[in-house]
Amino acid sequence: MKFLIVGNGQLGSEFERLLKKRSNDEFVLHDKKTLDITNRENVEKVIGAYQPDWILDAAAYTAVDKAEDEGKEVNWLVNETGTQNLVEVAKKNNSKLVYVSTDYVFDGTNKNEISENDSVNPQNEYGKAKLAGEQIVSKSGIDFYTIRTSWVFGEFGNNFVFTMQKLAQTHPELNVVNDQTGRPTWAKNLAEFIFYLIDNHSAFGTYHFSNDGVATWFDFASEILKNEDVKINPVDSSAFAQKAYRPKYSVMSLAKAKGTGFIIPNWQNALQQFLNEIKQNND
Ligand SMILES: NC(=O)c1ccc[n+]([C@@H]2O[C@H](COP(=O)([O-])OP(=O)(O)OC[C@H]3O[C@@H](n4cnc5c(N)ncnc54)[C@H](OP(=O)(O)O)[C@@H]3O)[C@@H](O)[C@H]2O)c1
């Protein structure tokens, strides 16, 4: 099969790493310089020339707070118009599409795990634009997987794990939010799940995916820094002024993902394996 990866951030780079090991497949990765999804002509030209079986869309505007004001326009341009461009060109070229979305399409007021069919109600600009992207994909008539995920960490890019590690080097104490609950996701496991769906011809449509188990940001930070000499204090969100709304309870159900047969590691194991891998790479 031929895969075209769009975006070389955390997930796009994991797609690349995985595809390098799959000798029967062909792939190409495009970053923003070679494929700007907001530029329709560019999208037509690159996808038309490569004719991929699958477009793996890992391109997004992910600056959630900036999306509220100075990044508002670009947020919509990338996450809505960019998705529209990819979808229309995918349709024209008969390519299937993987679109990745977010738990922020929900308002986080749920008391129970959120399933794929639960009502969406995004409360920040990023969530609204990502939902607009989802709707463009689902109404298009193309074959697609939309994967909603949350709290992504991985080797390639900025994320909460690296932020905590850096802060711990210069701060003896850290205050971390303990009133938002969700599920961390190792980008590597996310990429593996997506290839599992493709390889097993799982039913097209929307899936939730993250690592198993639940955590607050405080729990997550405590696990990341469990071997470091730093004190971590649980605090309320009100201690940190953030421009964008953050859901209090963002635990998306993994039942549908598990129903495919994919074994989902819990977040503590995924995190430990990730920390071991980056340590090995740095030694
Ligand atoms: N990170 C999370 O915690 C999280 C949570 C839920 C859902 N998601 C979703 O998961 C997916 C993967 O996220 P990620 O963590 O891998 O994000 P990421 O590391 O921020 O990567 C996004 C990539 O998209 C690229 N991009 C931005 N504008 C583009 C454009 N106009 N054309 C082409 N590429 C463009 C970025 O390039 P530049 O860096 O050069 O701008 C970046 O390489 C996204 O759809 C995101 O919405 C992420």
Image: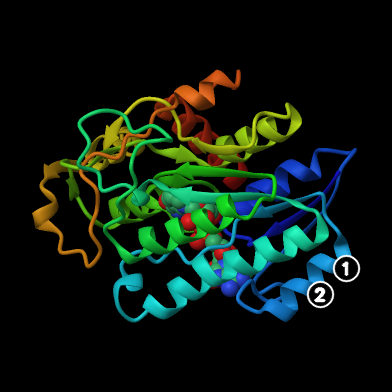
Colour mode of the rendering: rainbow
Left or right of 141 in this view: 146: left
Q: Position of residue 8 (x, y in %)?
A: 63, 60
Left or right of 283 in this view: 181: left
Q: Which residue is mark 2?
A: 45
- In which quadrant will I find the N terminus? top right
Answer whether labels 2 and 1 touch (C-beta < 8 Å).
yes
Q: Nearer the viewer, residue 207 or 137?
A: 137
Q: Residue at x 88, y 39 (%)?
A: 23
Mark 2 vs ligand 1: CB below 8 Å: no
Q: Residue at x 50, y 25 (%)?
A: 256
Q: Which residue is mark 1?
A: 49
Amino acid type for the residue under numbered disc 2 = Lys
Residue 213 shows in the view: yes
Residue 265 shows in the view: no
> Quick one: label 1, few (<14), some, or many (20+) residues within 10 Å?
few
Q: Nearer the viewer, residue 15 or 235?
A: 15
Left or right of 280 in this view: 230: left
Element on which disc 2 rests = helix
- In which quadrant will I find the C terminus? top right
Specify the label residue 142 is tagged with: none
